[in-house]
Image: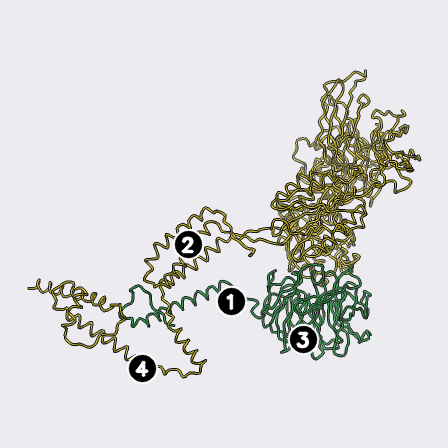
Amino acid sequence: MLWRGPILPATRPDCGDAGSVARRTWGRARLAVAAIAAAMLLCCGCGTDPNRIGRLQKVWGRRGLSDGRLQKPRAMAIDGQDRLYIVDMTARIQVFDRDGGFLRGWHTPEWTTGKPTGLTIGRDGNVLVADTHYYRVLVYSPDGKLLKTMGGIQGHEPGQFGLVTDVVQDPQGNYYVGEYGEYDRIQKFTPEGRFLLQWGGHGSEPGRFARPQNLEIDEQGHIWVADACNHRIQVFDSEGKLLKVWGSRGSGPGQLYYPYDLVLAPDNLVYVVEYGNHRVQKFTRDGRSLGCWGTNGRGEGQLFNPWALVRDSRGDIHVLDTNNHRIQTVRM
Amino acid sequence: MLPYSLSFDSPWYLLLLLLVPMLWALSFRRMGVLGPWRRWFALGLRTLVMVLLIFALAGAQMVHTSDRLTVIYLLDQSLSIPAEQRRAMILYVNAAIEKHREHLDRAGVIVFGRDAAIEIPPFDDDVKMPLLVESLLDPEYTNLAGAMRLAQASFPEDAARRIVVVSDGNENIGDAVEQARGLTGAGVGIDVVPVRFDRQGEVIVERMTIPNDIRRGQPFDMKVVVTNTKTPSGSDSGAVGGRLVIRQRAGDQARVISDEAVTLPPGKRVYSVRQQIDAPSFYTYEAEFVPQRPEDDTMRQNNRATAFTHIRGKGQVLLIEDFQGPGQFERLVQALRLRNLEVTLRASDQPFTGLAELQQFDTVLLGNVPREHFTDEQIQMLVRNTQQMGAGLVMLGGPNSFGAGGWTNTELEKAMPVDFQIKSAKVVPRGALVMMMHACEIPEGNHWQKVIAREALKALGERDYCGVVHWMGQEQWLWGGLKVVGGNRQQMLARMDRMTPGDMPDFDPAMVMAQKEFSRIQDAAIKHMIIISDGDPSPPSRGVIAALVNQQVTVSTVAVGAHGPAESRVLDNLAKATGGKFYKVNNPKALPRIFQREARRVAQPLIFESKNGVKPTIRFPHEMLSGIEDPLEPIHGFVMTTVKENPLVEVSLVSPQPVNEKNATILASWTYGLGKSVAFTSDCGARWASGWTGWENYDKFFGQMVGWSMRPVGEEGNFVVATDVEDGQVRLVVTALDKDDEFLNFLDMSGTVVGPNLEPVPMKMQQTAPGRYEGAFPARDSGSYFLMVNPGGGKAPIRTGVSVPYSDEFRAKPTNLGLLEQLAQLAPEGGTAGKLVPSPRQPSEIEPMLAVNSFRHDLPKATSSQDIWFHLVFLASCLFFFDVFVRRVQVSFAWVPSLAGRVRDRILRRTPEAPKPEMIERLRSRKAAVSQEVDQLRAAARFETSEQSAATAAEVEELKPSAAPRPAPPRQEPGLAPGQEEESYTARLLKAKKKAWKDRENRQE
């Protein structure tokens, strides 16, 4: 591309030929344009974009009561076929494909006392529901048939529950059930539902809990706990021995504020969704923060008290944007 | 067609577009040097900039036209419509929405009776309305106009609007047609679904009348008018059998005085019952018709009528004492009875049922009862009973009275001669109250949280601290921690109104915040915290509980049943650990009283107690203290108050302590409205004035105090009062005779009325004939109206009552098709008239009603406009930059053919021509430049000897052939003569230089 200088007779005889003058002028113009562009970028805040570690893929879900709509959804799970199971404040469990297409739905048996706050897919593909305010775990087939109920009696004896937060299954099929209230603890049961052991207790010391809102099991069978009101993540072995604890209250990188859910990913990664900070934070499994995605708000790419997140087979993260009654899919 | 268009706020500015051709005319020639493409491009940009600026000046707006439609159903839930029909209209709405609503259309539901409420806000979903209406309405009236107003305010702006009225059309408040005209004028369509039903039969007790001049022991006849609306058909005579029951009530005593089987033929019948009254009191009579077969009578609400009469006797006193601490006033009751007063003792949990019941009493004593034992309505009744009906009101002290009883900021405080708050910092220590809100998940949770916060704040004094902590994305204070109520009260109330607490996950951080704030406040003597929650946040840590206990902060907890029965061991334990109280609440209506009671803990510093006792001194010799002189017996305590700044207030007794006499009132009184009120801030001997029980003047003191407060007693017999209710108006006729039965003329007679809602109703009395005075007032609401007529001239007031037994709602009218058709015929601005949905008489037949689609898109489309002038200015600025750029910078596209050639060669796999070596090109270029310079120098040298001052280019050309051979000039573009231009410039310079040298040489010579 050849640029010529200005038409006005302003060229000085000692400035060389017209081509070099034009090139110098264009060089200055290019510099100016680059400076303006940089300034504009800075003004727009892109230099401090909190969503830089993730790229929003899709936003779906609308508030409502009819099939396919959501009313303050609070828990989510994903199965091997990337079908999303979501329970909301109407106590409906609805199943969607990964793009938000409604597939089916059903209600929990009772919901006047309260609605479930935990969902997990079991080893056999069944849906495990933490029916929080009925002090029990419900086991459904993927098409919504109630197969089994665990617990149902409030109390602190083995096999009794407080407010159940989540239930997971290890590779051997053992169940781990988290609960909070008077006795924040995790109980372990055999696949048949026989009590094996329990650990925890209410408190902020390592190994104790203040609302263990979410449980996950890693490749080694270790139990990861989102210790929500202690603003930290704790990791235990299958016997309840504390292996790691990391995280502290705050809104800075690496800090947590009501972590309500976590998902383990390959490459030694863990994603944590923070109810209080309205964001998803990416960590190494040692607790080193690799960045955050999401800010507080109602726009796309913004979250309002998110409760849960899952990771699909393509590696995309689906965030349950609870108070916005929707799901946001992010590639991180 | 695009849904967007452009409009202008000030279109006259568009005339400036005429300048555009002028711009072209001016610019076209001057831009000739740019070449054709750049000229047209620059001209286009410049035109665009100018047009954009003119559009911005004209106030350009982007107008969006929406295809969406919002339909709001207005469901009449008044009792004139049978329950089965009301249920059927809900089923119809659900089915109609499901069948007709299109993808983006919205549907909403408003239910109405006397008032209207949004049952389901407009929403783009197939809303399913539950069969049980959740909104609380007064179903005894029909206010269709009010519902239309609410609908108009509820429509979103971005869609066409239609209402569907589902009603029997029997409105009795407002003017629906007028309101509908306003709606259609605003483009709102109206469809109508008439609710039709067959009334099987209806019996109405029209009225009950008793003479007004009843004397004690004198028999009189009361009359009951009953109407049977059934029409005889065939073998059915239309007669309805049943019982006519007449009851008499005096105070809390009720008895049946007549219960007769009657058979009502169609039409109107009058029944008469003879009665005699022996004991003085205020009597209420009630007649009720009970049908033998329920199907003979559709509405039971119109089966009753009431009437009042009053037989005067000796002074009647009502003493209300705390139901949780009975027996405190036995000595006082004894003293009053000795003064020949009739004393009725009631517990505060069942004090009185209505204003009618209070009419038998001449004064009401509140004996150390806290505010939370009374509803707002009961307090208003007590105040109206004094203000409008002339009764006395005496508040007797004790730890649960005045400000210490939570009576601050109530209607009753206004009626008292003292204020219940202390403004002086030296007198009363402060209290601090923190409320923690977590009840968002109970039904209407945020509404109730606002109510209870307001009630608690009301109970606090000006100097107390108040703070509200809640969850809004994180734990936070509603107004930045604990602040003094004082001048912040209104601001605090405003913040409370806007408060929308979220779902708090954890008690601990919020409690830590509260604990830190309590520790910051050093001058609060009482620190209290109230937590309302459904109990599901994570429990607080032991550390924060211990810190609260150390700081002597008490924590009361209120468990509300968001998740089933209200129960929470966490909350229970918290209250126990800190010395607070735990409440379990299943009905939110109980919450305000709990918060009033709990806030009262902070108000306790208002009590002044002295172990040694203080001797009250007489400040003013009021008639209540007649015959009583200083020194009085000492008392050991009282509740501090502040004397009202009003000349009517008479402070009779004060305590020497505290020093500020304004806060040391023991006895004060004033006239409030037509009655009198008295504040006695110590008790009557139970705790603080125990020394007075043996005092010789005890009976006299309290007897005179109560006696002074009582309603004036006088002869009423020479006034005959008659009342009549007709067409929503009550007419009152008073015939005034003196003791010789001569007419009393020119009396300055006035009257006051208290309506069923306890609000005063204006009434003016005027003389219409000798001894005859008349007044009237509207009585739209059903219920009891109490009248107090003051004959003037120092005569005792006359009291009477009149009852409007039921509203027009129960007049058993048929469907008002005329009104409904009129509504449907109104055509909205720019649209077609509404439709009358064919409605069957059987509520189960919904299908035919669905033939009319109320979601049809035949209404004017909604448009919304948005200012875009600032965007245009910004765009014009950007384009202006490009305008300058195009004119100043020439962009060559010479590289395009060579690039195309290279691409073509690559595609066709041709061997491209070898480029000329760059070095040779540069050498050639340099050689040409040097040759040009040499040529120029030669040309300059050739003119050096010329004497002419200005040689033209033509002359130079003419000289060229004769010039000596020289190197060929550099190749020039045809038509261009840069050499000439430069030669001319250089030549002129050289010539000027030569001339200067020559002049200098000449001068030297």
Q: CA distance from mark 3 to mark 2?
A: 68 Å
Q: Secondary structure at mark 1?
A: helix
Chain assignment, label 2: B
* Residue A170 vs residue B364, the one in the foreground: A170
Q: Residue B301 shows which numbered tag?
A: none
Q: In this picture, is B490 found above or below B337?
A: below
Q: Is residue A265 visible?
A: yes
Q: CA distance from mark 1 to mark 3?
A: 34 Å
Asked which quadrant contains residue B406, the reply is top right
- Same chain shared by disc 3 and disc 2: no
**Image coords of residue A71 (percent x, y):** 70, 60
- Residue at the far right: name it: B261
Q: Nearer the viewer, residue B949 or B639?
A: B949
Mark 3 element type:
strand
Between marks 2 and 1, how big is the CA–CA gap? 35 Å
Q: Which residue is mark 4?
A: B919
**Quadrant into which the N terminus of chain B falls:** bottom right
Which circle's residue, 4 or 2, is located before the other in the chain? 2
Q: Residues within 10 Å of mark 1 (few under 14, many from 20)?
A: few
Determine whether the residue tagged by mark 2 lies in a helix, strand or loop: helix
Q: Which mark is residue B50?
A: 2
Closer to the N terminus: mark 1 or mark 3?
1
Kindly identify which residue carries mark 1.
A47
Q: Which mark is residue A244?
A: 3
